[in-house]
Image: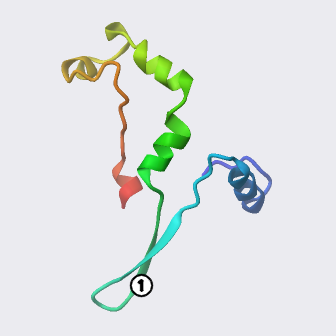
């Protein structure tokens, strides 16, 4: 994580002050061996509404032109579409 404040405490405090902040929900899972594993969940829908749905991004999507994107995007007819990418390390 990139540090923007002198301490992680202050950085977390700053981030939580943002009105778009979505508090992660802690979920505990019990393995077959009886060990508890925790993960944190934030609904994708809330992330999209809070961070993606704004006039500037929507304008950029609507005004995107074929010569501004890769051949892959053109071939798969994704021009003028919101494209989301997830990474395996974010899921494991």
Q: Which residue is mark 1?
A: 36
How dense is the environment of label 1, judged by Cα within 10 Å: few (below 14), some, or many (20 and up)? few
Q: Position of residue 82 (x, y in %)?
A: 37, 29
Quarter holding the C terminus?
A: bottom left
Residue that sits furthest to the left in the current view: 75
Q: Is residue 72 left or right of residue 40?
A: left
In the picture shown, does residue 71 fall above or below 23?
above
Q: Is residue 54 left or right of residue 14?
A: left
In the picture shown, does residue 25 fall above or below 54?
below
Identify the residue at horizontal 51%, vertical 67% (top origin): 25
Q: Is residue 34 left or right of residue 43?
A: left
Residue in the foreground of this view, choosing between 37 and 62 = 62
Q: Position of residue 54 (x, y in %)?
A: 54, 29
Residue that sits furthest to the bottom in the current view: 34
Identify the residue at horizontal 80%, vertical 54% (top origin): 6
Residue in the foreground of this view, choosing between 40 and 43 = 43
Q: Position of residue 27 (x, y in %)?
A: 45, 73
Picture colour scheme: rainbow
Residue in the foreground of this view, choosing between 49 and 29 = 49
Q: Which element type, helix, strand or loop, lies under badge 1?
A: strand
Identify the residue at horizontal 70%, vertical 58% (top origin): 12
In the picture shown, does residue 23 fall above or below 70?
below
Residue that sits furthest to the right in the current view: 6
Q: Position of residue 72 (x, y in %)?
A: 24, 22
């Amino acid at each position: 994580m990139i540090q923007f404040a002198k301490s992680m405490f202050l950085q977390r405090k700053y981030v939580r002050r943002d009105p778009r902040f979505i508090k992660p929900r802690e979920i505990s899972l019990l393995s077959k061996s009886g060990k508890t594993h925790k993960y944190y969940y934030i609904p994708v829908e809330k992330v999209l509404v809070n961070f993606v749905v704004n006039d500037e991004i929507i304008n950029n999507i609507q005004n995107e032109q074929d010569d501004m994107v890769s051949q892959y995007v053109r071939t798969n007819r994704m021009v003028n579409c919101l494209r989301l990418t997830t990474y395996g390390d974010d899921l494991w």
